[in-house]
Image: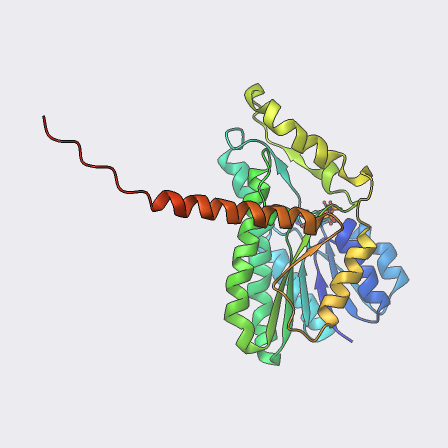
Amino acid sequence: MGRWLVTGGSSGLGRALAAAAAEAGHRVVVTARDTATLEDLAAAWPDRIVPVALELRDPAQCQSAVRTATDQLGGIDVLVNNAGAGLFGAVEEVSDDEVRDQLETLVVGPWRLIRLVLPLMRAQGYGHVVNVSSLAGRVAFPGLAAYVAGKYALEGLSQSLAAEVASLGIRVTVVEPGGFATRYGASLTRSDRRLAEYTAVTSDTLAGVRGMADARGIGRPEDFAALVLALVADPGPTPLRVPVGDNAFAILEAVEQASREELTAARALTRLAPPRPTPAP
Ligand SMILES: NC(=O)c1ccc[n+]([C@@H]2O[C@H](COP(=O)([O-])OP(=O)(O)OC[C@H]3O[C@@H](n4cnc5c(N)ncnc54)[C@H](OP(=O)(O)O)[C@@H]3O)[C@@H](O)[C@H]2O)c1
């Protein structure tokens, strides 16, 4: 059975995954900013769940989470960078500090955990890094630029990482959830600055995200968890990026189609004859 480190276990996808992994017999270090939220998980699987406090933006807590996993489990086979939260605001509304804060959670924290876990995985000659991105890691939405930037960055670092560690026996998977019924929409924070000029183009995104958990046909966290367990158990090779959820594939097909059309248009544009120099008067 595997030794897992799963971040963001207080609710939603991370909580469902930690429970499913423990149920399947794995030993799981589960993190939460408030470990009281993990008490019921630990009580349900006392030999398999180890709760650890982790604020992703705190380097010392990242170090101690990995140290606890090493001490308690003897190592880490699977790191799931799941914890995350979104910031809502148009590009002009979001401040430098707000961008930095969003990227600390979505990019710097997961990157730091990967850096801390890789020496263990290299030493044992195997391991699996699962980074939970989003469809927003493949397609941008107005009003979510900071979140989108974070998820695109997570996808980019994952792609580089996969190429760097494949020969070391370490696998990398980016999981891209569509819509799942979690606290994600409720915990979306708003930039301090608000400009009325952007309401018309961003309000649909905000309403969509806030109402996501109650939307018809929304995914169940348990289904997400089952898919991640199956992915990790699969001997591979598996795709680097794996969309999850009923709507995810249809949306990404449309994104791919739009991307092909954009490439065709760009090629046509760059093949235009260069403009003739204007004759000197
Ligand atoms: N639900 C969806 O439809 C959906 C779609 C695409 C992507 N995702 C991604 O899925 C992942 C899980 O989100 P979810 O949907 O399960 O939402 P959720 O129910 O709000 O859970 C998010 C988890 O991340 C933790 N977290 C947030 N910021 C953190 C930080 N700075 N340091 C440590 N922990 C932090 C939260 O802890 P606290 O309880 O302490 O806040 C919570 O445990 C996220 O990366 C999200 O971007 C979700």
Residue 92 can be seen, yes or no: yes
**Which residue shows up at 76% across the image and 61% down it?**
227
Residue 138 can be seen, yes or no: no
Q: With respect to residue 66, does 178 lie above or below?
A: above
**In screen coordinates, is 240 left or right of 177?**
left
Quarter of the rendering containing residue 88: top right
Picture coordinates of residue 45, whole percent (x, y): 87, 65
**Which residue shows up at 62% across the image and 38% down it?**
87
The image quadrant where one finds the N terminus is bottom right
**In screen coordinates, is 27 left or right of 79?**
right
The image quadrant where one finds the C terminus is top left
Quarter of the rendering containing residue 207: top right
Query: How many numbered marks have been drawn onto this rendered protein structure?
Result: 0
**In screen coordinates, is 22 left or right of 125?**
right
Q: With respect to residue 126, does 63 lie above or below?
A: above
Quarter of the rendering containing residue 265: top left
Q: Which residue lies furthest to the right in this view?
A: 44
**Which residue shows up at 52% across the image and 37% down it?**
97
Q: With respect to residue 93, does 179 lie above or below?
A: below
Q: Which residue lies furthest to the left in this view?
A: 281
Out of 190 and 152, give the one closest to the viewer.
152
**Which residue shows up at 75% across the image and 73% down it?**
2
Q: Which residue lies furthest to the bottom in this view?
A: 124
Picture coordinates of residue 80, whole percent (x, y): 68, 61
Q: Which colour scheme is used?
A: rainbow
Q: With respect to residue 94, does 10 lie above or below?
A: below
Picture coordinates of residue 92, whole percent (x, y): 50, 29
Picture coordinates of residue 196, whole percent (x, y): 58, 19
